[in-house]
Image (tube, rainbow, N blue to C red):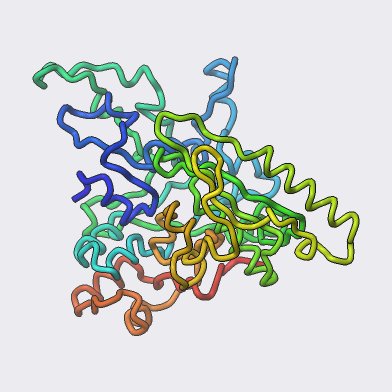
Amino acid sequence: MWANWENRTLLEGMAAWNTVENSRAGAMPPGYPPGSSECIEGWMGLAALTLNPHFGTAPGITAAEQASVEWSHFDDAVNIYGIAADGHPARTWSNVGVQYGLEAVAEGNITPEQFINLNANAGSWKNESDMVQERCPYIGELCAFVDPTVTPPFPGIWPDQLDPWSWNNMALSADGGLTPAPRVTADPGAVEAAYDRGLVNIGDIDIPMIDWRNYLERELDMHNSHQSFASRQRLLNYDGDASNQVIWFTDVAEGQGRFDQTPMAFEVIDEWMSNIADNPGGGVAGNKPSAAVDSCFDADGELIAAGSDVWSGILDDGSEGTCTQQFPIFSTSRIVAGGPITGDVFVCELMPVSEAIGRGDYGSWTPGPGEVVALETIFPTGVCDYSKGDANRP
């Protein structure tokens, strides 16, 4: 099933295409199915750079200097997150109760067996004190190997050094999921600090904004387009008003450079701010220029559609607007797991598996007795109830 790259979106949420060139194709065995995903093209290696204190680089430093510095994101901001009991920075990362692939099983796109197997094996990242240095492909000298047993000889890597997804730094199941892989929860104080110290955009913004981006989903770029709407929903969640944010997308044609809508955006912002200066009583919403409206443009920068409803169907249940149809929005593995588009729930509130079944979270699938036992074994403290927000948000 997963040899069809586009099926991977069912679990990852992010874009995947069978027709794009895979940047890692040279490290794959002959005959591996063509295609790739944003997970590979945009995010491969980012977990190592974010979480592993033993892995990081900077221009002009020696190996000894590199080894003397702890490089993770949490080390960088330890003055905010604080120190955990193991002596390393406290972390906001948590996946207790997260049901990976929940939307996929509820919609019948994967089987209950696949869903249970996935979540039994998902595991978590190890604590920083248990992490080790990364392997191939992140350390190039570990990748040079030619396997003479393969015809034709395949330039690959030493089997015990292959670790493209940082498996050596994951807490996994020792028996293929019979004993579920352990999950990990965040440090409550770290989550609170992230909010208190301004590391999380909670939507408390009232200045004029044009959120413009080239549409890069076809290129599997990590700067995925759903983030524009995550920001809008955070604004709406804060005070019910997102009138200060305008969303523009500009298409990208294959073999053509990216059209830059920035000069136009600056002109509109300049007019918008001048209007506010001349008429402060009108506020941000009352001083919007006619061009300060949700819009989408073709690859040459020409307007396709503009108006308050061009992005309908993304944050509401309305029919898809013109821009929504033109520029499909993808998501993330946490959204597929039932999380909000805002992506701002670090530690979810939990509910019993029986409650999730009772309210229909699994769609047309009603887990049988054996499946209920399996789910309760994987999630002994319960599954995420995203309707209640973040358990540690101040």
Q: Nearer the viewer, residue 169 or 314?
A: 314
Q: Residue at x 20, y 44 (%)?
A: 3
Q: Residue furthest bottom?
A: 358
Q: Pick the quarter of the image with the C terminus.
A: bottom right
* The image quarter in which residue 60 lies: top right
* Rendering coords of residue 343 (x, y %): 52, 59
Vertical position of residue 197 compared to residue 129: above or below: below
Q: How many marks?
A: 0
Q: Is residue 222 visible?
A: no
Q: Nearer the viewer, residue 276 or 83?
A: 276
Vertical position of residue 98 compared to residue 252: above or below: below
Q: Residue at x 69, y 49 (%)?
A: 80
Q: Residue at x 35, y 76 (%)?
A: 361
Q: Is residue 165 visible?
A: yes
* The image quarter in which residue 25 lies: top left
* Rendering coords of residue 44 (x, y %): 40, 37
